[in-house]
Amino acid sequence: MRLHSIISLFIGLFCAQGLAQQEAQLTQFMYHRLVYNPAYAGASDMPQLSAATRQQWIGFQGAPSTQALSFDMPFLSKRLGLGLNLTNQVKGLESKQTVGLALSYAVAKTNDWSIRGGLQMSMRRYGMDFTKAVTNGPLSEDGSLGQHFETQWVGNFGVGLYATWRDWYLGAAVPFLYRNTLGITPNSPIIAQESPHLFAIGGFALPYTDKLVVKGNGFLKYTPNATWTMDGNLNFVYDDQLTVGLSYRTGQKTWMRFPESIDILVFMNLNKHLGLGISYDVVLSSMAAQQKGSLEIAMQYHWRKPILQLSNPRGFF
C-alpha cells in the first residue's frame, strides 16, 4: 500500500471546515445519539436500532454523503449497556468507513435520574480513489499522485458522559481521542491528522396538552483550531404519532450573521416499534447558489415500547 501527500492535502482542506466535514453530520441527531456518544448505549433500557442516510448539497459534484447504522441494548444488567456503530462517509475522492464498539455503565440510576459513562473502541478505513481525479495530464506524470484506489486503516478510542433527569437529558463525548496521522509518505512536508471532536447534546420533552408534547434539542460541535457550530431544534409531537419541527444550524463564523441552514423535520411512528423520519436542509450559507439543499432519511426500531414514552428522557425519541 502506498499513500501519498495528496491525501493529506485533500483531507486537510476539509478539516479546515471543522466537524461538519470531518465527522458525520446528521440533522436528525436526536435519533442517533449513539453515533456521537458511547455513554448512550443501553440508556433507553431496551434494544433499539437506528439508521440514517444523508445526501448533503444535492446537485453539487463530490458533496458529502453519509450512512449510519447503530444498535444498542442493556447488557447483562440494567446498569451495563452495549452498542455498535457503523458509518460510511464519501466526499469527493475520499471515503471513510468506521466500526465502533461502545460500552457504558450507569454509575448512578434511579427512577427519576441517571448518570452514565461510556467508552468506545473503533477501527476506521480511509480511502482515496485517484482513478476519479480530474487532471490536466496522465496521473503517472505526477509522482505525488496515486494511480489506484488506496486505503489506510487506523484505530481509535473515545469516552462520553450521558445524564437524564425526569424530562431532560444532557451528554458530552469525544468519540475519537487519538490524533491519527493520515496519508503521510516518509518525506512528505504535509501533516494531516484526525482531530478530536467534542459533541455536547441536550434536550427536553414537556407535555403541553393531553395530546401535544413540545420537545427541544441542542447539539454543540467543537474541534480545536476551528469555529464551534451548533444545531438547535423545536419539535411538536401530536398524539405520540406525528412529530413536526424546525432546526437552525449555525455557520462557521458567528451564529447570527452566518447561518448554515434552516431545517424542516418530520417523524412518524408507524406502530409501537417502528418510526420513520425525513428532513430537508434549506442552505443559507455561501453554498446556497451551488446546490439544492440537503436531504436525510432516518429510521428507528424499538424491540419493545418504553414505559412512559413521552415523559421518560431515556426513551422519548
Image: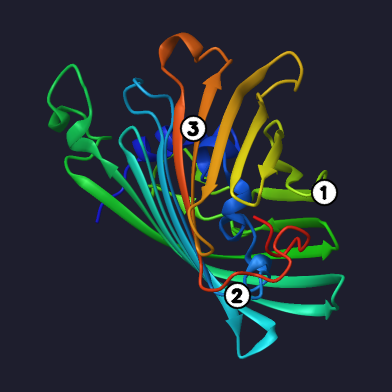
Q: Earlier in the sequence, mark 3 or mark 1?
A: 3
Q: Which residue is drawn at 21% across and 23% down?
A: 134
Secondary structure beneath label 1: strand
Write down the quadrant of residue 262 in the picture.
Answer: top right
Q: Badge 2, how many Cα within 10 Å: few under 14, some, many 20+?
A: many
The residue at which mark 2 appears reads as 46
Q: Measuring from the top left, give residue 207's x and y in whole percent.
A: 81, 49
Q: Residue at x 23, y 29 (%)?
A: 133
- The amino acid sitting under disc 3 is Phe
The residue at which mark 3 appears reads as 14
Nearer to us in this view, 135 or 207 = 207
Find the residue positioned furthest to the bottom: 76
Q: Distance between the residues labelled 2 and 3?
A: 37 Å
Rendered-image quadrant of the C terminus = bottom right
Q: Is residue 111 left or right of residue 236?
A: right
- The amino acid sitting under disc 2 is Met
The residue at which mark 1 appears reads as 206
Secondary structure beneath label 3: helix
Q: Which of marks 2 and 3 is nearer the N terminus?
A: 3
Q: In the drawing, what numbered circle is on residue 162?
A: none
111 to 243, vertically: above or below: below
Q: Measuring from the top left, give residue 231's x and y in whole percent.
A: 68, 35
Q: Which of marks 1 and 2 is nearer the N terminus?
A: 2
Please indicate, yes or no, whether residue 26 appears anywhere in the rendered image.
Answer: no
